[in-house]
Amino acid sequence: MWYLYGLALLAGVANAIEPGQNATLAKATGQPMLAGIFCFALAMVCLFGVMVVARLRSPSTTEQATPVPWWAWPGGILGALVVLAQLYVSEQIGAAPFLGCVITVGVIGSIALDHYGLVGFERHPAGRWRIAGGVLMIAGVALVAAF
């Protein structure tokens, strides 16, 4: 299971690099929406390739299909909001404050999601140490943004 943390760390590195790439593409082309469409098109090609490889390794059956809750479908809209923020906000406020805000709000939001067991997550109570961690993250982002 340790490798999952490695993948999460790689995702964090990608999360730090991607806003600069997308903002640069938007600025260089002068077309932020076109840059966003290119970003999603390339992501779809990558996901399709991974899906093909994964299906070759373990084909799925119809018995594995389950009904999908309504709230699972609009995740792409949330992804589009993240990319739009990368295109329009990250270059204006800088990489560190932008990513600090995104990650901190993500952690605080995930503490609430875990506490209430929302959107498919198991319940993990928001104890004092989790809350203290969220508060420290807010303080850290404030320091990064101020200096």
Image (cartoon, grey):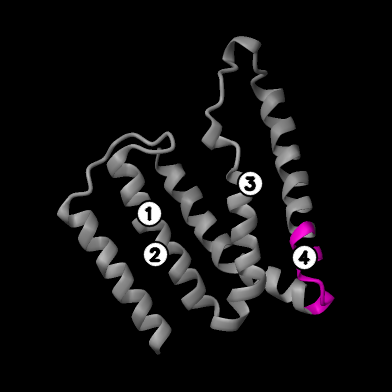
Q: Which residue is mark 2?
A: 104
- Real-space Cα distance between discs 2 and 3? 21 Å
Q: Pick whichever of labels 2 and 4 is earlier in the sequence.
A: 4
Of badges 2 and 4, the one in the foreground is 4
Q: Quadrant of residue 67?
A: top right
What residue is at 44 percent from the left and 69 percent from the top?
Answer: 101
Residues 72 and 96: in front is: 72
Residue farthest toward the bottom in the current orientation of the protein: 147
Residue 129, image x, y percentages: 18, 56
Q: Relative to residue 22, is residue 107 depicted above or below? A: above
Point out the image quarter for the N terminus. top left
Q: Which residue is mark 1?
A: 109
Q: What is the span of residues highlighted in magenta in the rendered image?
A: 28-37
- Real-space Cα distance between discs 3 and 1? 18 Å
Q: Pick whichever of labels 3 and 1 is earlier in the sequence.
A: 3
Q: Quick one: SS at disc 2? A: helix
Position of 108 compared to 128: left or right? right
Residue 40, image x, y percentages: 73, 53
